Amino acid sequence: MTEDQIIGLLSSNIIYLLGAALVVVIILKGIKIVPQSEKYVVERFGRLHSVLGPGINFIVPFLDVARHKISILERQLPNATQDAITKDNVLVQIDTSVFYRILEPEKTVYRIRDVDGAIATTVAGIVRAEIGKMDLDEVQSNRAQLIERIQESVETAVDDWGIEVTRAEILDVNLDQATRDAMLQQLNAERARRAQVTEAEGQKRAVELQADAELYAAEQAAKARRVQADAEAYATGVVAKAIQDNGIEAAQYQVALKQVEALNAMGKSGGSQTIVVPANALEAFGDAFKMLKGGK
C-alpha cells in the first residue's frame, strides 16, 4: 500500500470518527434529563418554545436551548418587618413570613425580574392596607383572620407571575414603649374597675339578703300576731257564747276564776309569804270560791 493510500485511509477514518462524534454530540444535545425538583424553560431563536418537566425530554439540537432552569421547590422569603398604622392610629410593627413556589416558570421568567423582592414589596403593601382597616384589639385578637386575608390578597397579586403563595404568617405584632405603657395603665384601670364593681355587687347582695331576712322576720312576727289575735278572738268568742247561754253567772264565774289565779300567783312569788288583803277583797274571793265550787 502506497503512502498516498495510507494517508487517504487515515483521512477517511478521521472523517468517520468526526462524524460519529458529531452524531453523539447531536444526540446528547437533543436529550434533556430534568430533575424532579426543576423545570427547564426552552427558547428557540431567542423566543419561548416550551417548558420541560421532570424526566427525559427531547429538543432540537443547536436550535432549542434550555435557557432557564427553575426550581419548583417551596421557598421562604426572609422574615420582614413592616410598620403599619391601625384604624385607631396606633403604630405597630408586623413581623411576617411568606412561603411560595413557582408553578409556571415561563411567567416567572418573562414577567418579573426579582421574584423575592416583588413578593416582599407586595406583602408589605397588603399588610399595611389590611392593618389600616382594623383596630389594635382586632389585630391582636383576630390574627388568624388577618393572615387569611393577607394570603388571599397576595395570591391575587402574584397570580400573573405564575406563583402560588402556600402560606403567609404573622410572626409577631410589636408596639412602641409609649403604647405599651398606656395599654398597661388601661389594663390596671380596668382591673381596678372590675374589682370595685365586684365589691359593689357584693355589698348590694349583702343588703338584699339583709332586707330579705328582715322582711322574713317581719312576716313571721305578723303571722305570730295573727295567730295570737285569732286565739284571743276565739277565746273572747267562747266567753261571749257562754255569757249568752248562761247569763251573768258565766261572767261572774270567769271573774272568780281570774281572782283565784291571781291569788295563786301571789302565793307562789319569791317574796314574803304574808299577804294583806282588804276585807272587801276577801268577800269577793269568798264569792268567787263559792261560784267555783258551785260551777264544779
Image (cartoon, rainbow, N blue to C red):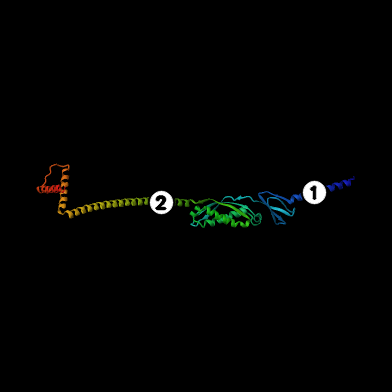
Q: Quadrant of residue 274?
A: top left
Image spot of residue 92 (x, y percent): 51, 53
The residue where tag 2 is placed is 194
Q: What is the CA distance from the residue labelled 2 to the residue labelled 1? A: 92 Å
Tag 2: residue type?
Answer: Arg
Image spot of residue 31 (x, y percent): 73, 50
* 172 displayed left or right of 111: left
Residues 183 and 170: in front is 170
C-beta proximity under 8 Å, tags 2 and 1? no
The number of numbered discs placed on residues in the rendered structure image is 2
Q: Residues within 10 Å of mark 1 (few under 14, many from 20)?
A: few
Residues 58 and 233: in front is 233
Q: At 16% across and 45% down in the image, what residue appears?
A: 264
* 257 displayed left or right of 9: left
Query: Of helix, strand and loop, which one carries label 2?
Result: helix
Q: Residue furthest left?
A: 279
The residue where tag 1 is placed is 20
Image spot of residue 32 (x, y percent): 71, 50
Ranked by sequence position, the earlier of labels 2 and 1 is: 1
Q: At 88% across and 47% down in the image, what residue appears?
A: 5
Q: Quadrant of the N terminus?
A: top right
Residues 182 and 9: in front is 9
Query: Of helix, strand and loop, which one carries label 1?
Result: helix
Image spot of residue 122 (x, y percent): 58, 56
Tag 1: residue type?
Answer: Ala
Label placed on residue 232 = none
Q: Residues within 10 Å of mark 2 (few under 14, many from 20)?
A: few
